[in-house]
Image (cartoon, rainbow, N blue to C red):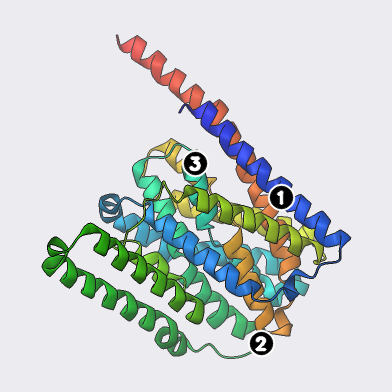
């Protein structure tokens, strides 16, 4: 599929998502629907994100993941904090009234949505290294942002002390042990039993493990475990799951539209947050990614938000009344980032890349 046709399909998908969001907004406004009051909505959102994370990692080539592990580790360890601290500082400086929640807003928007990222990766041209790094970045930044949100900036907003030990034991250590236990069992199972049983039995075992992990994620709100097991428990083909991913993306658009109807949107501060988040993402990409200039350029304009940002916003707002005004800032930031992403990638795909190809062709003719 050529780049122009691929881009048209992608922008058609985005148009559908926008239409769904606007329709949801109009419906919620007209019927005065309070989406927060819908029973078990947060659990449904967690399930959707867990599935999106799993499919996102499922699309990562394992050999490429191992090859580019250094770059992936760099963007997770250093890139995510850059994307939290720089926009948070800018929002706190430019809006002193929102200083208490500035870093929480920044933490929410620092996430790259794995569902939207997976959808867009099928339609944008990146090197294998950048594809793998972006997928891993989108899939594994959640535990880091949760750490910053709930155990650093939320206590700061409450004027409380930060207890890293609590977070390390209750979330990181337990999740790592769960993943390690599953991996150990799979290594044993692979070595001794996989060649002795039928493929249908193996498929059933894999599906059962994935289902149990999703249940674990719902009860513990863990997003790391569903993402991590996709590196070695793979009963599904990522391409076959594309329809499900599109369905989750539609659900995200509808949810965002419904939440917009009950929120007093602050477009000014949302723009400030979005602008400095895009700057921070570009800075992190420039400093931490070593790749072809065009791939780096695409990575710089690949920060996409969606369901994960909304999920974390709602989780924070429900956790304490002191931070119950995040959504008016984060929602417009998500919208601004989405439109900037669309415009910038449209220009790169249809203007810059053809010019680059023409330049390469001219240089080739000169050499000949």
In this rendering, position of residue 210 left or right of residue 198: right
- 208 vs 250, left or right, is left
Disc 2 versus disc 3: distance between alpha carbons?
39 Å
Look at the image and tell me whether residue 255 can be seen: yes
Q: Is residue 359 left or right of residue 331?
A: left
The foreground one among 273 and 173 is: 173
Circles 1 and 3, Cβ within 8 Å, touching? The answer is: no
Asked whether the viewer can see residue 86, the reply is no
| Badge 1 element | helix
What residue is pinned by disc 1? 20
The residue pinned by badge 3 equals 298
Q: Quadrant of the N terminus?
A: top left
Judge the density around disc 1: few (<14), some (14-19), many (≥20) Cα neighbours within 10 Å: many
Which numbered mark, 1 or 2, is in the foreground of this view?
1
Give me the disc on residue 158.
2
Q: Nearer the viewer, mark 1 or mark 3?
A: 1
User: Tag 2: Cα neighbours inside 10 Å, few (<14), some, or many (≥20)?
Assistant: few
């Amino acid at each position: 599929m050529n780049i122009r046709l691929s881009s048209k399909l992608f922008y058609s998908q985005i148009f559908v998502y926008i239409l769904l969001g606007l329709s949801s907004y109009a419906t919620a406004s007209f019927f005065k629907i309070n989406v927060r009051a819908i029973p078990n909505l947060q659990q449904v959102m967690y399930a959707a994100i867990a599935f999106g994370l799993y499919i996102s990692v499922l699309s990562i080539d394992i050999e490429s993941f191992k090859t580019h592990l250094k770059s992936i580790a760099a963007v997770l360890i250093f890139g995510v904090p850059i994307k939290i601290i720089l926009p948070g500082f800018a929002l706190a400086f430019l809006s002193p009234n929102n200083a208490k929640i500035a870093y929480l807003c920044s933490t929410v928007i620092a996430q790259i949505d794995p569902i939207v990222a997976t959808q867009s990766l099928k339609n944008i041209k990146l090197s294998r290294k950048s594809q793998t790094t972006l997928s891993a970045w989108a899939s594994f930044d959640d535990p880091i942002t949760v750490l910053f949100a709930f155990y650093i900036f939320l206590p700061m907003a409450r004027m409380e002390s930060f207890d890293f030990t609590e977070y390390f034991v209750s979330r990181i250590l337990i999740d790592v042990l769960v993943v390690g236990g599953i991996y150990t069992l799979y290594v044993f199972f692979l070595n001794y039993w996989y060649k002795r049983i039928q493929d249908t039995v193996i498929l059933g075992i894999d599906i059962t493990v994935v289902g149990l992990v999703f249940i674990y994620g719902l009860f513990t709100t863990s997003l790391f475990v569903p993402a991590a097991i996709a590196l070695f428990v793979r009963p599904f083909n990522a391409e076959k799951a594309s329809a499900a991913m599109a369905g989750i993306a539609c659900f995200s658009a509808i949810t965002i539209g419904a939440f917009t109807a009950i929120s007093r949107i602050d477009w000014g501060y949302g723009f400030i947050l979005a602008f400095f988040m895009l700057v921070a993402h570009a800075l992190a990409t420039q400093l931490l990614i070593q790749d072809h200039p065009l791939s780096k350029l695409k990575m710089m304009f690949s920060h996409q938000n969606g369901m994960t940002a909304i999920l974390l916003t709602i989780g924070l707002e429900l956790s304490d009344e002191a931070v119950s005004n995040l959504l008016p800032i984060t929602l417009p930031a998500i919208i601004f980032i989405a439109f900037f992403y669309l415009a910038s990638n449209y220009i790169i795909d249809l203007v810059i890349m053809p010019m680059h190809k023409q330049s390469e062709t001219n240089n080739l003719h000169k050499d000949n």
